[in-house]
């Protein structure tokens, strides 16, 4: 299993062949990490230097500075007016440039891709004191507690703006882990019990702030926690160490590639949700893998 698949043939102008775009979609959906040694979209050195000037000890910074592009809202940063405006502009432009790039590079997804949050991650990952389920240095697959995907895939684009490598480890991909561990992690019980989800759906439908999770979402949240809780898995599973150099950019479906962040600081990230109907290789999606194991639909 290679650490990544480097993209060497992408062109940002002119004709980008549909067959290449489809091929890269398929590689992503088969849980490859697509790697660019430099951002395949505009990013200025002045903006990079501003981000690098943000210090972990600065009270203006939270764990992540988040940006919600659909509402143009910045959260997690409280500097003076000038600094806040600049941070807001950088994240707004990063989100827009990544979105334009993804629309071209992964053209088969088209307008069906859902734009999610962007973030700036200024803190050093190594040595952070976090509760078990929030630790980034433990292998896990992503799931969003407040934003259920109902089988949609979580596509993330990262850029390492640091002057040091960002170090990940990965392991066997989702299909292998699900076949080995999904039953022990509670998939049969979640698949067969719908009462709680029906109540949540009813409360959500009348406007209460309750996440309307499908069985798939419920299991993926459980699997995220179960993998982090499983010390035997964390210590004994095969591991590949990946060192992402400064200013590299990579794309990955983080619901299908178990990953942990061992070290690194100053990263930008944009998330998208790719619904099942937009996928080029839907049989490789985690929801289809789990439905095959559970022998029941999980999207409700």
Image (cartoon, grey):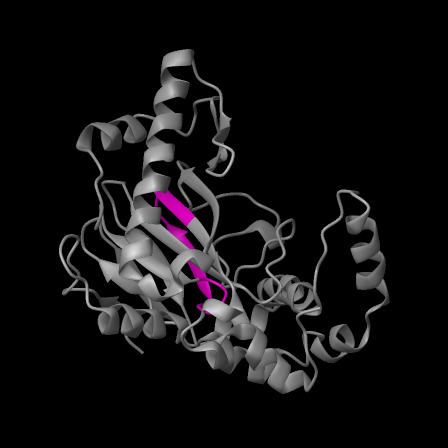
Q: Position of residue 79 (x, y in %)?
A: 44, 17
Q: Residue furthest top?
A: 81
* Left or right: 40 in relation to 130: left
In percent of the image, x 63 and y 81: which residue is there? 291
Which region is colored magenta? 254-270
Residue 76 can be seen, yes or no: yes
Whether residue 266 is visible here, answered yes or no, is: no
In the visual, does 118 lie left or right of 18?
A: right
Q: What is the number of callouts on the image?
A: 0
Q: Is 124 in the magenta?
A: no
Residue at 75% across / 72% down in the picture? 190
Q: Nearer the viewer, residue 170 or 95?
A: 95
Q: Is residue 5 above or below residue 86?
A: below
Does residue 269 show up magenta in the picture? yes
Quadrant in the picture for the C terminus: bottom right
Q: Quadrant of the N terminus?
A: bottom left
Q: Position of residue 134 (x, y in %)?
A: 58, 50
Relative image position of residue 173 (x, y in whole percent): 45, 75
In the picture, measured across the screen, residue 61 lies left or right of residue 17, that is right
Tell me where residue 250 sits by quadrant. bottom left
Q: Residue at x 26, y 50 (%)?
A: 165
Residue drawn at 28 percent across, 51 percent down: 101
- Give the quarter of the image for residue 179: bottom right
């Amino acid at each position: 299993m290679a650490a990544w698949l480097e993209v060497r043939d992408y062109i940002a102008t002119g004709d980008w062949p549909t067959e290449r775009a489809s091929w890269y979609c398929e590689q992503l959906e088969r849980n490859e990490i697509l790697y660019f040694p430099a951002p395949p979209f505009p990013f200025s050195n002045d903006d990079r230097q501003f981000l690098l000037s943000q210090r972990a000890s600065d009270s203006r910074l939270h764990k992540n500075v988040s940006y919600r592009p659909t509402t143009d809202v910045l959260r997690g940063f409280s500097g003076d007016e000038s600094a806040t405006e600049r941070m807001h502009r950088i994240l707004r432009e990063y989100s827009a440039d990544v979105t334009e790039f993804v629309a071209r590079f992964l053209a088969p997804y088209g307008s069906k891709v859902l734009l999610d949050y962007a973030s700036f991650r200024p803190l050093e990952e190594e040595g952070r004191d976090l509760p078990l389920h929030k630790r980034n240095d433990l292998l896990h697959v992503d799931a969003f507690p407040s934003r259920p995907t109902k089988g949609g895939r979580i596509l993330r684009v990262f850029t390492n703006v640091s002057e040091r490598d960002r170090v990940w480890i990965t392991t066997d991909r989702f299909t292998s882990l699900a076949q080995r561990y999904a039953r022990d992690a509670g998939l049969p019980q979640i698949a067969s019990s719908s009462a709680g989800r029906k109540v949540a759906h009813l409360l959500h439908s009348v406007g209460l702030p309750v996440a309307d999770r499908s069985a798939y979402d419920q299991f993926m949240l459980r699997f995220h926690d179960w993998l982090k809780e499983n010390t035997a898995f964390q210590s004994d599973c095969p591991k590949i160490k990946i060192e992402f150099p400064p200013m590299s950019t990579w794309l990955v479906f983080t619901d299908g590639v178990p990953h942990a962040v061992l070290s690194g600081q100053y990263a930008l990230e944009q998330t998208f949700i790719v619904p099942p109907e937009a996928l080029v290789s839907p049989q490789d999606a985690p929801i289809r893998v789990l439905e095959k194991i559970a022998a029941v639909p999980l999207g409700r």
